[in-house]
Image: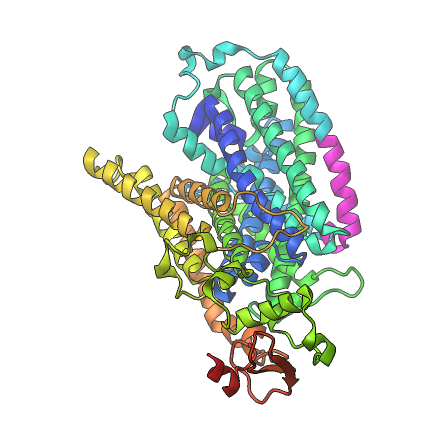
Amino acid sequence: LTGTVARDIAGPAVVISFLVAGFASLLAAFCYAEFGARVPRTGSAYMFTYISVGEIWAFLIGWNVILEYMIGGAAVARAWSGYLDSMFDHKIKNFTETNIGTWQVPFLTHYPDFLAAGILLIAMVFISFGVRVSSWLNHLFAAVSLAIILFILIFGFILAEPKNWGAAEGGFAPFGVSGIMAGTATCFYAFVGFDVIAASSEEAKNPQKAIPIATAISLGLAAGAYILVSTVLTLMVPWKTLTPDSALSDAFNQRGYKWAGFIIAVGSICAMNTVLLSSLFSLPRIIYAMAEDGLFFQIFSRVNPHTKVPLTAILTFGSLMALLAMIFDLEALVQFLSIGTLLAYTFVAASIIVLRFQNSKAESPLPVNCQASPPPSNASLGSESNVDLKEYESFSDKLQLVDKEKRGKEHREPGQLKAAFEPYLKFLNNCYPGEVVTISMVAIMVCAISLCSVLVFGNTHLHLPTWSYSLLLLLFTLGFCLSLFFIWVHEQQPKASTFQVPLVPLTPALSILINIYLMLKLSYMTWVRFAVWLLIGLVIYFGYGVWHSKENLREPRSHGVTARYVVFAGSSLKETVQTVQPKTQDVMGMAEVTAEEEDMR
């Protein structure tokens, strides 16, 4: 990956590409960490989207996450094959091209890579034996990888030559800012691993603490390693001479240290083995979650009784992954992976905003101050205690029996307008809780897409005049900021004991903006292939998922109301409150208001 981006897209400025990609991934990691801690369920972005914005969007994200893991595993297998081939002076490649043949097809590899397909099939077998075997192998390969990275950094900086960043070689950023951002979109591939942690949160002992800590550590180590290694690589040899498939080992070979190139090739293979196992570990769990919900074929929800893994899903999609690795080009795979990953990150960020401004589904369907209480005694009715008055004030607030000042002091539900902004934004008072947030979230997406489209295509493809280019940037930026403001003026959920994304809705909104910008920097052929993949997914959803969805087949839930309040008017604000059995109930599950209450209003 580093060699491909440095040679063809960004030059030595690949360092900046990794830095920007790491920052964008950090924003997405915050969102994943909150969801992984709050919803410790298998399924990652799919489950998070299902909870927040609904079934069809969850299916599309789950379908893209399947693509992410399949392409990720196939791309790593291609790189694995390239490094092993470099250890034998590319004899495997030459043998295949001579005896089997080549083809010249866009975005396909020049020859069938049977070695990449074979390593995926072997890794699939290990994953089929269960979590313990794959976990043990992951720890072993990770230890070797860390040792090799330290070797690369120490020995590489000794061999570094600053002139390779000089003007004679094209400078530090030969492709300019556009090349850096295009490289950032591709470099996103380097940071896809942290969502594996959230995908397996159901198997963690203490997900509320473990998921955020593990996400932060893994992202920090990955970002630091990629930035330092790309710095060493582009300082050791001119960026134009890099070999995309095995850049690190070939760089040491160019400097005359073949033994070092051999060690690095071995270490790189060990590192890529951990990624292969992670992709094959997470892929069947996403498929299992979708199949359990009825959105995907039920055969993939079957768990082997001995190994405790969804064996059918592993074998089926592991074989498809091997086929992709055998026929697709590495750069095409990486770009294809990036677009699916960025879309998943965008939906998870949007889900954080939606979830923060709606009532928690884990709570009782009735507000606390509307729940039934035992009939009060005579002593309590005659009491002047503050406790009785406070209890009564909460109840009477609900029935609108007190003046506006008291109602302004009551606790507001998530999604309701904050009391401080009520006098200034009166036109929002009649909206349902969460309604303005939902509309503003849609506006943020539209403004972000429009703003990024102008930034990416305004001067190059659309050839906009300077005045219209500036005007459109100003309008869409104002729309984006105004939508953020309308979300911010509403109440959020109370602070939880688990990890929460800071500065909501600003942090998720920035993540959405960066992700969309990077998606638009990818090639048009990547979008075409992605559209075909989405079309296949929609055919599966409307042909199978809609008819077998457990959510659609589920009977309407009763709200469990066991009592309603009746208020008998008196001469003061201490009326008699009694509980009676309910006759009917409204669709929101709220306590029924009787005729006596209507008379009091």
Q: How is the image coloured?
A: rainbow
Identify the residue shown where x is 51% and y is 25%: 15
Can the viewer see residue 244 in this picture?
A: no
Residue in the foreground of this view, choosing between 283 and 569: 569
| Relative image position of residue 585 (x, y in whole percent) | 55, 83
Identify the residue shown where x is 65% and y is 77%: 372
| Relative image position of residue 371 (x, y in whole percent) | 63, 74
**Which quadrant holds residue 247?**
top right
Query: In the picture shown, does residue 328 fall above or below 572?
Result: above
Residue in the foreground of this view, choosing between 48 and 584: 584
Magenta span has 378?
no
Query: In the picture shown, does residue 189 fall above or below 3?
Result: below
* Number of marks drawn: 0
Magenta span has 140?
yes
Identify the residue shown where x is 77% and y is 54%: 129
The answer to whether residue 577 is left or right of residue 443 is: right
Main SS class of the magenta portion in the image: helix
Can the viewer see residue 7 in this picture?
A: yes
**Which quadrant holds residue 436?**
bottom left
Residue in the foreground of this view, choosing between 432 and 34: 432
Magenta residues span: 126-145
Query: In the picture shown, does residue 170 fall above or below 212?
Result: above
| Relative image position of residue 421 (x, y in whole percent) | 42, 53
Identify the residue shown where x is 27% and y is 35%: 460
Q: Residue furthest bottom?
A: 583
| Relative image position of residue 347 (x, y in whole percent) | 49, 53
Residue in the foreground of this view, choosing between 168 and 407: 407
